Image (cartoon, rainbow, N blue to C red):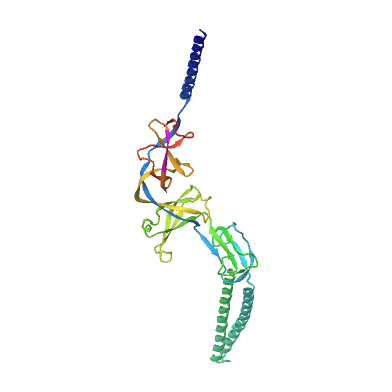
């Protein structure tokens, strides 16, 4: 009897445990919720675009050089300074030229004195000639002397003007408004025409210069719209083709193309930045293309979450190819008719229920 009672107790205990476990499992299943996602089909063709690498440059840029060798007396700017057109940048020693100017000015004073005396002599000779006190030849000689002195004065004035023009090159001024991007001289240095003293770049305007092969140069036309993307960010700028070189003789078989950025918000741009020029063509690329944001990375592996028949997320490992803007080509591991998950409200993992 005790054995029967003990057996019945075990059966009841086991049944209650199974019921309890089943209830917990049922409760867990019932509380599992799906997450909201966005899905889309991969693209099977894209407009074919050409991409070329280059560097951002200021649209207006110049090297400030001296016309001749001279010592630097003073430099009024430093790297990073914003300057206005006509602002004084560098003063060069012009002692030799100032001495020459003083000499010419003294000559001019002497010529003016001679001219004044000769003009009075001409007037006296004219009065004497009217009275027949001198010959016509004597009057002619004094008039020729006056003309000679006037010519000498004109030559001296021309010489003084040339010196003043030369002096302008000893006071180096900004040819346009911009930013000083390089300073290569200090006070007391010997400046010469072979080395730039300063580098000045215009404010606001930027362009991208790239090299294009003869196979692709046919796609570039002036005023065509292109996209410029910075190398180390996703920032993009609209641009137009401003220059297309017609010869590659001096550039190693490559044609130079310049694109001017038309955006006015260029605060994040600096000359020298690496960037790419993207030009859309009338041709199309065939394949399977997905958003780059949909790619999942696990070390060296790349995958994409796809929608399964049970409305769950399924991680599919894929092999990717070239990037086309914000799209990337999938070479294997994905079929064109499959739907891919492009975004989710929470973290995805294999087998999670989804809704869309």
Please provide percent x and percent y for residue 297. 47, 42
Along the viewing direction, whichever of 93 and 352 lies nearer the viewer: 352
Along the viewing direction, whichever of 232 and 121 lies nearer the viewer: 232
Q: Is residue 195 above or below residue 270?
A: below
Asked whether residue 42 is drawn in magenta, I would say: no
Say left or right for 38 vs 194: left
Residue lying furthest top in this view?
1
Q: Is residue 28 above or below residue 308?
A: above
Identified at 34% across, 51% down, the residue is 282
Say left or right for 102 vs 48: right
Majority SS type along the magenta span: strand
Q: Is residue 138 above or below residue 84?
A: below
Q: Is residue 13 above or below residue 29?
A: above
Identified at 51% across, 11% down, the residue is 6
Quadrant including the C terminus: top left
Identified at 54% across, 64% down, the residue is 63
What segment carries the magenta color? 313-318
Say left or right for 168 vs 214: right
Tell me which corner region of the image, top left, top right, bottom left or bottom right, holds residue 120. Answer: bottom right
Please provide percent x and percent y for residue 311. 40, 31
Please provide percent x and percent y for residue 8. 49, 11
Please provide percent x and percent y for residue 70. 61, 71
Along the viewing direction, whichever of 196 and 339 lies nearer the viewer: 339
Tell me which corner region of the image, top left, top right, bottom left or bottom right, holds residue 257. Answer: bottom left
């Amino acid at each position: 009897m005790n054995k029967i009672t003990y057996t019945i107790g075990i059966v009841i205990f086991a049944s209650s445990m199974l019921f309890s476990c089943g209830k917990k499992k049922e409760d867990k299943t019932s509380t599992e919720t799906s997450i909201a996602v966005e899905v889309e089909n991969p693209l099977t063709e894209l407009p074919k675009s050409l991409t070329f690498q280059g560097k951002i440059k200021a649209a207006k840029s110049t090297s400030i050089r001296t016309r001749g060798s001279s010592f630097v007396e003073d430099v009024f700017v430093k790297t990073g300074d914003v300057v206005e057109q006509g602002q004084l940048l560098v003063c060069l020693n012009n002692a030799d030229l100032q001495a020459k100017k003083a000499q010419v000015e003294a000559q001019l004073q002497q010529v003016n004195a001679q001219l004044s005396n000769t003009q009075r002599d001409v007037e006296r000779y004219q009065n004497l000639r009217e009275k027949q006190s001198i010959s016509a030849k004597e009057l002619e000689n004094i008039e020729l002397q006056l003309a000679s002195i006037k010519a000498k004065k004109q030559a001296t004035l021309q010489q003084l003007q040339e010196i003043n023009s030369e002096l302008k090159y000893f006071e180096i001024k900004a040819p346009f408004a911009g930013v000083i991007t390089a300073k290569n001289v200090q006070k007391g240095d010997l400046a010469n025409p072979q080395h730039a003293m300063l580098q000045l770049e215009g404010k606001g305007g930027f362009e991208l210069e790239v090299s294009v092969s003869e196979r692709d140069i046919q796609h570039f036309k002036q005023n065509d719209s292109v996209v410029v993307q910075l190398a180390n960010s996703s920032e993009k700028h609209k641009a137009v083709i401003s220059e297309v070189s017609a010869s590659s003789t001096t550039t190693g078989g490559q044609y130079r193309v310049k694109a001017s950025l038309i955006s006015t918000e260029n605060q994040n741009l600096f000359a020298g930045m690496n960037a790419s020029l993207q030009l859309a063509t009338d041709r199309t690329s065939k394949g399977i293309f997905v958003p780059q944001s949909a790619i999942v990375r696990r070390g060296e592996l790349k995958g994409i979450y796809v929608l399964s028949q049970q409305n769950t997320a399924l991680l599919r490992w894929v092999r990717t190819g070239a990037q086309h803007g914000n799209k990337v080509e999938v070479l294997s591991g994905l079929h064109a008719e499959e739907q891919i998950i492009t975004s989710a409200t929470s973290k995805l993992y294999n087998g999670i229920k989804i809704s869309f």
